[in-house]
Image (spheres, grey):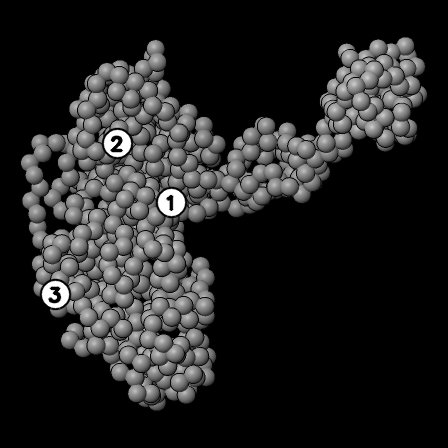
């Protein structure tokens, strides 16, 4: 019973949450036997479902097996399904709920009304109880004083031995899980359908699929979670982090023993009866191997792989800019906020592609030769010829002219002899020769550009050709840049001993402008937490996103990551990237923060790899992945396993060479380079001629 990835989900049934992480929200823990990620905060069930679908797809693309567990009942006590749907099949209940439960991005849902509908089917006074809404609901009592179980058990058999488990019939109140199940089972139903035979649900199905869903109860960790709470961690966040770690630490035989259950009609709780094992593994302290490596992480801190970090960013971010209307000349370089359709066909009428003579093809059947008289006048580009060309006659026609009435074919002027009143030419002639059909390029009402596209000069030509004079675009994304550190001084000022010139801010501001964003200089913050907090507050008020450099590690003066951690918004850090450790990713007053390393090389690499695609998404554009290409290496390197590496590089004579030093402080290497060589997460021995992936700066 082996899995590569363990996902633990603490579900919630209420309203969507704000940007600041809090308890009683959705939290997700992700772990493997070598990595325990920081808990992920989800603001809504829709966001969580999107993340789960994306992450499970990504895991399967890598060939991984996944155990995804959720903290609500997968089934109801015995007899409920039979009474509701006429069958003991728990999946039938999932389907029944999925057809009725509604939910939206704000968290507005109808769970209490659906519970009342079930109660009315049972007679109107149970088994569900607990209505906390301001309105009365027929069939759903506000408390337990008046309700009936209708001969159903209070709890499932798998819940009898565990102390503190609430009945699934209770919908409201501290610790209640009934509402979570009503809102969670439809999500499991959709995942079950989405991944089909690649997913099984334990214990109703054998746990041998690539993806296995299971029910868990985080309170099995007991005092372990309470200790984490005492240290300031949000309870739900601690639960998913520690439980995912514990599950990932289980021996395969022990996990198989936990999953060996019978009588699955009511479901089962993974780990029930094994709380001591889970608590031990959740707190197990593994000493790190001696690496003698400045990029090694401290004990207790685990890497977040680059692809995982990118996938989490992609799942969590969405456009934050407003839509506006722009004329074509002002729209170039901006991102479309809606699809654009052609107002007119191109070409609008059938026309000629050459200079020549037009006629009806039916009048020149066979091989010829042919001789046709010419009508008076000619057809040229501009207004259409006002007249009819009779069958057996021809008309002089010039490139781009609309075909006159009676003309469907054009013969090239070089293939014709004319005395001014007649023309002669040879056949055979194919109907429609040298003509363009109306709308053969673009048809009226055809969608020509999709939302999320950045308008190019060529797009302006297309839009003009089909009659579109203005389009809906997003306003430019406003990105602030803030440097931190007492050691920094502005270029042009006198630098004292121990001070350095701020190279990051000019570099990042210039890069943002080159990408078409509105770059806002937020200045330099000293190593004073209160001052940095005030500057972040001011920046969040006028920016859609903020890039900071410095202070993202875990030292005494690393105030950026400390502030994000204090607010509970530190989403990702310690990315398995070189250069790039550390990188802090979080949210400040609703504004995404990219806490870049202080070294210029690492700052630029993290901006290219993480900030670029994320800023694209925030700006309304599409998530971008640079399309590098394989070229022979003009260098040698023995790369260790564990981190994605990016080397400053340039192309010379069909090979890629790398900068002489990998040090993050060697700013000259950024100017020397034309792009980056990307080396994969695993170990790799590179010799001269080994194919490596090169990504020019322009492709980011």
State the image coordinates of residue 296 (x, y, percent, origin top left): 14, 36
> Which label sits on residue 680?
2
Count residues near mark 1 (Cα–Cα under 10 Å), then give few for <14, some for 14-19, many for 20+: some
Camera-side residue: 518 or 340? 340
The quadrant of the image that shows the C terminus is top left
Camera sees residue 658: no
Location of residue 268 with respect to 321 vertically, above or below:
below
State the image coordinates of residue 29 (x, y, percent, origin top left): 25, 54
Quarter location, residue 283: bottom left
Q: SS for tag 3?
A: loop
Tags 2 and 3 touching, CB below 8 Å: no
> Which label sits on residue 274?
3
Nearer to us of marks 3 and 1 is 3
Of marks 2 and 3, which one's residue comes earlier in the chain? 3
Q: SS for tag 2?
A: loop
State the image coordinates of residue 526 (x, y, percent, origin top left): 27, 37
Camera-side residue: 551 or 385? 385
Count residues near mark 2 (Cα–Cα under 10 Å), then give few for <14, some for 14-19, many for 20+: some
Report, in whole angstroms, how far the alpha carbon at label 3 lies from the one at label 1.
Answer: 36 Å
Name the side, left or right, on which 477 lies relative to 303: right
Camera-side residue: 254 or 216? 254
Nearer to us of marks 1 and 2 is 2
Residue that appears at 32% across and 15% down = 655
Residue that appears at 31% across and 81% down = 79
């Amino acid at each position: 019973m082996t899995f590569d990835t363990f996902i633990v989900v603490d579900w919630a049934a209420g309203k969507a949450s704000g940007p600041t992480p809090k308890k009683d929200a959705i939290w997700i823990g992700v772990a493997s036997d070598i990595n325990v990620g920081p808990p992920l905060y989800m603001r809504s069930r829709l966001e969580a479902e999107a993340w789960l679908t994306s992450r499970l797809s990504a895991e399967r693309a890598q060939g991984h097996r996944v155990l995804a567990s959720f903290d609500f009942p997968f089934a109801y006590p015995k007899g409920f399904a039979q009474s509701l749907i006429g069958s003991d099949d728990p999946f039938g209940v999932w389907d029944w709920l999925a057809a009725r439960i509604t939910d939206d991005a704000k968290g507005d849902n109808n769970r209490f009304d659906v519970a009342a509908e079930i109660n009315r089917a049972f007679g109107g006074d149970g088994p569900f109880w607990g209505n906390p809404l301001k309105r009365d609901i027929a069939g759903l009592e506000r408390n337990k004083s008046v309700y009936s179980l209708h001969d159903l058990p209070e709890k499932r058999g798998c819940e009898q031995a565990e102390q503190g488990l609430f009945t699934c019939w209770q919908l409201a109140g501290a610790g209640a899980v009934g509402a979570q199940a009503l809102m969670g089972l439809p999500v499991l139903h959709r995942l079950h359908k989405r991944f089909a035979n690649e997913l099984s649900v334990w214990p109703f199905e054998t746990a041998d699929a690539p993806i296995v869903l299971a029910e868990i109860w985080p309170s099995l960790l007991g005092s372990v979670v309470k200790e984490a709470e005492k240290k300031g961690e949000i309870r739900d966040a601690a639960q998913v982090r520690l439980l995912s770690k514990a599950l990932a630490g289980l021996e395969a035989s022990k996990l198989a023993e936990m999953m060996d259950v019978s009588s699955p009609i009511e479901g089962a709780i993974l780990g029930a009866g094994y709380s001591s094992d889970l608590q031990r593994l959740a707190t197990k302290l593994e000493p790190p191997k001696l690496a003698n490596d400045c990029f090694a992480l401290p004990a207790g801190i685990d890497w977040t792989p680059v692809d995982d970090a990118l996938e989490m960013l992609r799942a969590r971010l969405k456009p934050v800019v407003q839509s506006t209307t722009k004329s074509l000349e002002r729209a170039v370089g901006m991102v479309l906020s809606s699809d654009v359709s052609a107002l007119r066909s191109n070409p609008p009428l059938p026309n000629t592609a050459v200079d020549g003579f037009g006629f009806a093809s039916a009048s020149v059947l066979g091989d010829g030769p042919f001789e046709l008289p010419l009508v008076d006048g000619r057809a040229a580009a501009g207004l259409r010829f006002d007249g009819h060309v009779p069958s057996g006659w021809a008309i002089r026609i010039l490139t781009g002219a609309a075909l006159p009435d009676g003309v469907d074919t054009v013969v090239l002027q070089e293939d014709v002899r004319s005395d001014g009143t007649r023309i002669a030419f040879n056949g055979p002639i194919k109907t429609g020769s040298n003509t363009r059909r109306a709308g053969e390029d673009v048809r009226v009402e055809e969608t020509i550009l999709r939302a999320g596209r950045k308008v190019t000069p060529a797009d302006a030509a297309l839009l003009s050709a089909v009659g579109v004079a203005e389009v809906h675009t997003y306003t430019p994304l406003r990105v602030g840049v803030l440097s931190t550190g007492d050691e920094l001084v502005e270029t042009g000022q006198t630098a004292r001993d121990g001070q350095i010139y701020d190279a990051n801010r000019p570099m990042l501001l210039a890069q943002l402008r080159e990408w078409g964003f509105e770059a806002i200089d937020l200045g330099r913050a000293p190593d004073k937490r209160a001052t940095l907090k005030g500057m972040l507050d001011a920046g969040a008020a006028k920016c859609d996103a903020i890039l900071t450099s410095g202070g993202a590690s875990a030292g005494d003066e690393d105030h950026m990551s400390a502030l994000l951690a204090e607010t509970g918004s530190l989403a990702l850090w310690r990315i398995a990237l070189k250069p790039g450790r550390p990188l802090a990713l979080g949210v400040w007053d609703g504004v995404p923060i990219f806490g870049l390393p202080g070294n210029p090389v690492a700052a630029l690499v993290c901006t290219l790899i993480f900030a670029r695609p994320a800023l694209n998404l925030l700006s309304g554009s599409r998530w971008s992945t640079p399309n590098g290409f394989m070229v022979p290496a003009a260098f040698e390197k023995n790369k260790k396993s564990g981190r994605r590496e990016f080397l400053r590089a340039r192309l010379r004579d069909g090979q890629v060479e790398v900068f002489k030093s990998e040090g993050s402080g060697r700013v000259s290497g950024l100017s020397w380079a034309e792009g980056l060589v990307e080396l994969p997460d695993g170990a790799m021995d590179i010799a001269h001629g080994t194919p490596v992936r090169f990504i020019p700066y322009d492709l980011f």
